[in-house]
Amino acid sequence: NTITRKRNHNKLPPGPSPLTLLENLVELGKKPKQTLAKLARLHGPIMRLKLGQLTTIVISSPDIAKEVFQTHDLLFSNRTIPHSTSVHNHSHNSVAFLPISPLWRDLRKICNNQLFSHKSLDASQNLRRKKTQELLGDVHRSSLSGEAVDIGTLVFRTSINFLSNIFFSLDFVNSVGETEEYKVIVENLGRAIATPNLEDFFPMLKMVDPQGIRRRATTYVSKLFAIFDRLIDKRLEIGDGTNSDDMLDILLNISQEDGQKIDHKKIKHLFLDLIVAGTDTTSYTMEWAMAELINNPDTMSKAKRELEQTIGIGNPIEESDIARLPYLRAIIKETLRMHPGAPLLLPRKANVDVEINGYTIPQGAQIIINEWAIGRNPSVWENPNLFSPERFLGSEIDVKGRHFQLTPFGGGRRICPGLPLAIRMLHLMLGSLINGFDWKFQNGVNPDIDMGQPLRAVPFRINK
Ligand code: HEM
């Protein structure tokens, strides 16, 4: 599995034939995990896939990922643009898809200043505390009636309401019906980016939209934009008198001062990116963390014991407690290793010809880091298929993009800006769910959430 370091320009190991590749791509849309496993077995640390107009380099080795995220970060800092993001001209306004440019920098700066800096995260802590209490209230009600809860859906509701409060000072989701409505929007938009689209490989298909991806993306972006439009119009009508100081107010103020930096259209694209990038990934990670804990009773007991000793059974968890909960932190890392929310991260592009490990990556090639395969690679991790948070105790490996065997949030200048928020939310929600309740799978059965079954589990309230 080691890569030969001899000079081997332009002779990147080829991947499967175009036909097999096409089959794999179709499968990837349907069964992402099984397909990734197969691809990881088939190819080594680096592989070139040539299909139609697009050359894709798939990287499944920490050493080579380091070249992309650190050594040559700038040269790999743009993305290939999926055609599905051309909907509503999103790719030209999107912090996630713009090339490195003054607009991208302005948008990242706005995100950091308003949302993700230490200071703004501390300022929004009350809101997360409140949304977590509401989550626990829902779980408590189910525990009284002995009903199973759908973890992914509950966490989705918590995360989207947290974001909608920061943005607009209101809950997007107040009922089961609304949760479903927003979940469908976000899942479909995520899929529009993650599903391999034949249009991206064969540009002549762009008019045809053979998989209907662009049609679906148009429907769901339009739905979200209609909601944002209504909220922005309402805010502008109400005028200055009712300054609520949320992110919408701040962005409208910036747009008044400097319309170049951000305008109404760009505000909508930014909210779209943040909601799509931030909610599905968080609920997916939480669903897996809970599934692994319920499946591994010893790990669950250890986590509960740590919480009991540090915080006290049933007591509310504060974000400031996270630093004192090493086992809980190890559980989140282990979940992100085995079940990265974005298994192929987001695509990058070689801005010029770049030499890495003796290979020349051709200009314009799409670069995919196969995070899922790196997390399951037996030459990187001992017993990679075993859920064992202990491997992280006393280890310096973190998820901040500097340990290349574990980069679920990417790395370099394009690293996920939501990382600090995601980390706080994941620990807060997971710690709260297990410190307040015992959990069992519905009907005692371990659901295979790989197969797209949502995790349903029954909570039992713990008496203090
Ligand atoms: C467990 C949760 C999350 C995971 C696993 C995750 C993962 C990722 C990954 C892999 C990337 C691409 C990084 C790269 O190319 O190097 C990314 C980008 C991004 N993420 Fe996250 N993310 C999460 C949560 C969030 C949250 C909560 C937000 C915001 C509310 C967010 C907003 C973004 C944005 C805006 C980008 C694009 C950045 C750019 O291209 O400059 N993410 N995320």
Image: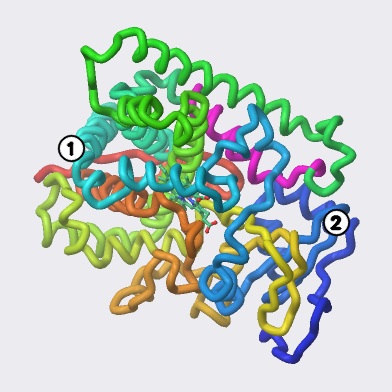
Quarter of the image for residue 218 reads: top right
Residue 113 on the magenta segment: no
**For mark 2, does the 10 Å Cα neighbourhood hold few (<14), some (14 to 19), or many (20 or more) residues?**
some
Q: Quadrant of the C terminus?
A: top left
Q: Residue at x 35, y 47 (%)?
A: 112
Q: Cβ(mark 2) to ligand 1 < 8 Å?
A: no
Give amino acid for label 2.
Leu
Q: Residue at x 80, y 63 (%)?
A: 49
The magenta segment is 181-199
Residue 126, numbered label: 1
Give amino acid for label 1.
Asn
Tell me residue 3's x, y (percent).
Answer: 69, 85
Q: Is residue 178 left or right of residue 166?
A: right
Residue closer to the observer: 156 or 226: 226
Quarter of the image for residue 368 reads: bottom right
At mark 1, the secondary structure is helix
Tell me residue 304's x, y (percent).
Answer: 22, 57
**For mark 1, does the 10 Å Cα neighbourhood hold few (<14), some (14 to 19), or many (20 or more) residues?**
few
Q: How is the image coloured?
A: rainbow
Q: Residue at x 76, y 43 (%)?
A: 197
Tell me residue 357's x, y (percent).
Answer: 67, 83
Residue 51, numbered label: 2
Residue 146 visible in image: no
Residue 289 visible in image: yes
At mark 2, the secondary structure is strand
Vertical side of 425 occupied by 240: above or below: above
| Disc with the residue nearer the chain's start (1 vs 2) | 2
Q: Is residue 332 left or right of residue 126?
A: right
Residue closer to the observer: 408 or 291: 408
Tell me residue 40's x, y (percent).
Answer: 68, 68
